[in-house]
Image (spheres, coloured by chain):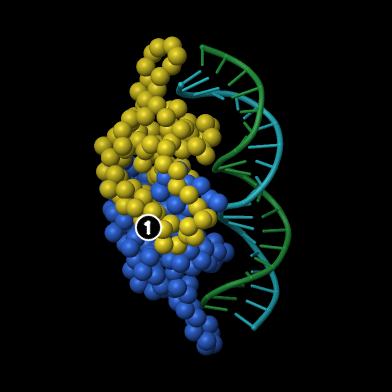
Chain colours: A yellow, B blue, C green, D cyan
Amino acid sequence: MRTYYCNLEVTLEIIGGKWKGLILYHLIKGPKRTSELKRLIPNITQKMLIQTLRELETSGLLHREMYKQVPPKVEYSTTELAQSLEPVLGALCNWGQNYAETSFAEDEYEILNVD
Amino acid sequence: MRTYYCNLEVTLEIIGGKWKGLILYHLIKGPKRTSELKRLIPNITQKMLIQTLRELETSGLLHREMYKQVPPKVEYSTTELAQSLEPVLGALCNWGQNYAETSFAEDEYEILNVD
DNA sequence: CGGCATCCCCAGCGATACTG
DNA sequence: CAGTATCGCTGGGGATGCCG
């Protein structure tokens, strides 16, 4: 029996951690192949990418579609459960942009959008 | 020069991690003393509580008010920057409640609200 | 009561090499 | 291209005890 002291703890257990939010953010915009995600999130290692995708799949947030061909092609997409996070993740993203603009020195950071 | 590949990475660096979101969530509802926060977040150790509060203060999200008296009294409150997270954290909280209700077996978890 | 300092463990993560 | 396997580190964080 797992005990939570706040509903937010549930959320953080499912989509918290170093990479889950970022992966969901990109996948919510549309299905992506493994290599596309790696390109969108350059700092993640392949190991962590695969591992995190597995966890999100287990939590019912992602769907994994495998095409039987050579070379292999795998595509990840979000479930309805994950889609409902779209406005929240969007808001968090905007908040980060605003935070950087107001709290970071202009010459101490950069945002490279790789879309 | 710190490089981000998505504005969401900024957000996660500031309010990500194991405890920051939870602490902000409680403090946004109103100023709290250290011991109150400890009671609201039973699983956090005092070390991590203090450490995380310091980091949030450094990031400009919290204000620390110290009353010179015996026994000591310290109160933490949110800055305007943190207040803007209220709707987002509230949404995440609701999402977690919904997730638990739909995806967890009823007899495998419990939510103890300590408000 | 609020906070700091130590010690120490372990799991999360990175690096690398390998497979179908 | 997608994924697995192994090794090894390191730092996040827990436990404990002390101080103003």
Q: Is residue B112 visible?
A: no
Q: Residue shown at 34%/66% (left/top)?
A: B83
Q: Residue shown at 42%/45% (left/top)?
A: B6
Give the residue number, with chain letter if any, for mark 1: A98
The picture places residue A5, in percent across and down from the top left corner, at: 39, 58
The picture places residue A30, in percent across and down from the top left corner, at: 31, 33
The picture places residue B67, in percent across and down from the top left corner, at: 49, 84
Dot 1 falls on which chain?
Answer: A
Farthest front residue?
A107
Instruction: Give the side of residue A113 with respect to residue D15, left or right.
Output: left
Relative vertical location of residue D3 with respect to residue A10 in this rendering, above or below: above
Which of the 4 image quadrants contains residue C11? top right
Relative vertical location of residue A33 with respect to residue A18 in this rendering, above or below: above
Which of the 4 image quadrants contains residue C19? top right
Instruction: Give the side of residue A24 with respect to residue A41, left or right.
Output: left
Relative vertical location of residue D20 with respect to residue A78 in this rendering, above or below: below
Q: Residue shown at 44%/69% (left/top)?
A: B62
Q: Amino acid at mark 1?
A: Asn
